[in-house]
Amino acid sequence: MAMKMLKSHLAPNSDLYLILQHLIAIFSENGEKMKKFLKYIAIIFVVFVADFFSKKYLLDLLANKYGDMILDPNAICAKCHINGVIISWQDLIGGDYGLSNLFNIHFVWNRGVSFSAFNFLMPVILSVITALIILWLIYYMIKKACDYEYLPLAFIIGGAIGNFVDRVRFGAVADFIQWHIGGLWTFPAIFNIGDVFITFGVILYLINMFLNRKKCSCK
């Protein structure tokens, strides 16, 4: 049916016709997996929105306090701490609520990937690599994923897209969560909501893979 509609509206030898024909073939061959993937688009979107608006809220707060210069990872903000900007929970959400015993809000621009890894690579290279990884994960979900893989991959893709958007917009990723335990121990990297979902997705993926290693058959 879809092919008949294409032939009636597009020239059979046109590039657009060939591209759409290829996409329809992929959908037809992987119809069930495509339907499953579409169900998890909502989760990918929710993760992306949570990451995007948490960063937007923080950046708007910082811009009001320090000016728009804080939005430029390459600018030097004279009023900012050399290693970033520390914000109180009171300023952020109007109260501490015991959160400072576990987390500090310490904003930094990260030119690397999750948890500040690979800072030495150029932003353009990292953007391209991130985009390729996201596309490959989406392809894998559509073509090859087992049932237990969809949810963790959706978490990973949503978080990765959030960080990818930052890198395209600013040339760096906004990190702001610093995990510690009552001042006795501090996690060595600062991260964001997208990183949390990526990490949780990887852990969930490994747990599911271990639990389903014998009974799952991916087709």
Image: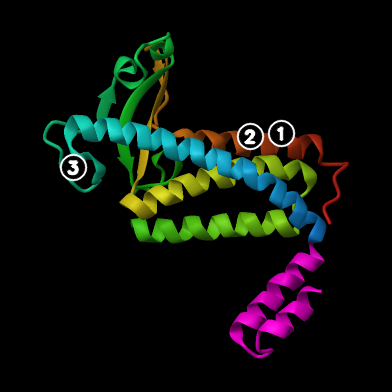
In the picture, measured across the screen, residue 169 lies left or right of residue 211, that is left
**Residue 204 against residue 121 in the figure, above or below:** above
Q: Magenta region: which residues?
A: 1-30
Q: Residue at x 62, y 38 (%)?
A: 201
What residue sits 47% from the left and 45% below the top? 162
Q: Is residue 94 magenta?
A: no
- Residue 1 to residue 85: above or below: below
Q: How is the image coloured?
A: rainbow
Look at mark 3 in the image and give the residue it sits on: 69
**Residue with the most extreme right position:** 215
| Image location (x, y in percent) of residue 190 | 38, 32
Under mark 2, the amino acid is Ile
Which mark's residue is nearer the viewer, 3 or 1?
A: 3
Q: Which residue is mark 1?
A: 207
**Which residue sits at x=85%, y=45%?**
216
Q: Decide if residue 135 is on the left or right side of residue 216.
A: left
Quarter location, residue 175: top left
Q: Which residue is mark 2?
A: 203
Q: Is residue 131 above or below residue 211?
A: below
In terms of depth relative to the viewer, which is nearer, 12 or 5?
5
Give the class, few, some or many, for how many residues have Cα within 10 Å of label 1's Cα (few <14, many ≥20): few
